[in-house]
Image (tube, rainbow, N blue to C red):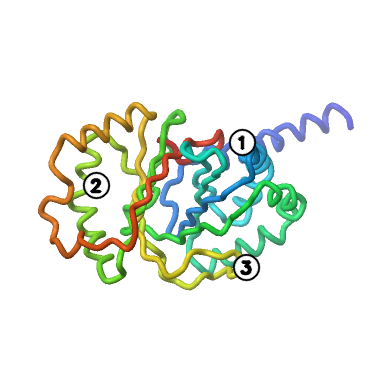
Amino acid sequence: MNRRSLLGLAPLMALAAQAKAATQDKPMATCCPIVELRQYTLHAGGREVLIDLFERAFVEAQEAVRIRVIGTFRDLDDPNRFVWLRGFPDMAARAKSLEAFYSGPAWQANRAAANATMIDSDNVLLLRPTTPEAGFATAAGQGDGLVVAEIRYLHPQKAAAFQAFVAERIVPRMKAAGARALGTFATAASPNSFPKLPVREGETVHATFLGFSGEPAHRAWRDALAAGPDWREGAPEALLSEFSRKPEVIRLSPTKRSRLRG
């Protein structure tokens, strides 16, 4: 190829590089009406293998079929746990996008290596924002930071009242004590639109995602909350007397390519 041809290709190559960078660094904007919270239990030593493979082979491949890779994390309290979030415009789009990805070349070429790291990949909650404004609607955070997911398990008949109480009373206190509110979510009640991948069914959850600059900031936040008024103060007794199981708190360290950060 002569020099003139190479010069003619240069603008196209520059545009392609810009498009890839935009895909990697674009803020989450109004993502996403449907969100999967996926927690994988891995064989000892498998987490770094899976993270490397995931970030090389699976991010762009999912984005290309309209799957938004929101966040990828190391669980700070379990060295064999990989946690990630992905989002979709709606349940119908989810089915189409997942079929396209899992039948596509990136997954087919790398699925054996990915599956070899895993003991269990079925711990999946299907979520929706509690309000349109409560989703992951801000640009990704700066630096690594810490993301904390607080998951509460509710009786179905109390879910709506608890969501309102969290929005009106709990989230403002969390923010005043120093947390960055990243999003609040509830169980997406729609049937699983891609049955090839199981999700946890028959559970009603409320999930709050909080951001911190790091573990010291999270500890300081917890101390500030403990020193302030009890968050349950003023809540109807019937609302808080019965959770279906103990709340779950997951401390997450973002991987290199995670959009969602503390």
Residue ID at (50%, 58%):
124
Res 15 visible: no
Residue ID at (34%, 59%):
245
The N terminus is located in which quarter?
Answer: top right
238 lies left or right of 84: left
Question: Circle 2 sits in a helix, a strand or a loop, which is it?
Answer: helix
Q: Relative to 233, say whether 194 is above or below.
A: below
Q: Amino acid at mark 2?
A: Val
The residue where tag 2 is placed is 171
Q: Amino acid at mark 3?
A: Lys
Question: Circle 1 sits in a helix, a strand or a loop, which is it?
Answer: helix
Q: Relative to 154, say whether 37 is above or below.
A: above
x, y percent for residue 125: 46, 59
The residue where tag 1 is placed is 18
Q: Relative to 36, say whether 139 is above or below.
A: above
Image mark for residue 196: 3
Quadrant for residue 230, please give it: top left
x, y percent for residue 135: 37, 52
Quadrant for residue 102, please give it: bottom right
x, y percent for residue 147: 41, 39
Q: Nearer the viewer, mark 3 or mark 1?
A: 3
Q: CA distance from mark 3 to mark 1?
A: 35 Å
Residue ID at (69%, 44%):
57
x, y percent for residue 231: 18, 47
Estimate how packed mark 2 is, as few (under 14), some (14 to 19) or many (20 or more) residues with alpha carbons within 10 Å: many
Q: Nearer the viewer, mark 1 or mark 2?
A: 2
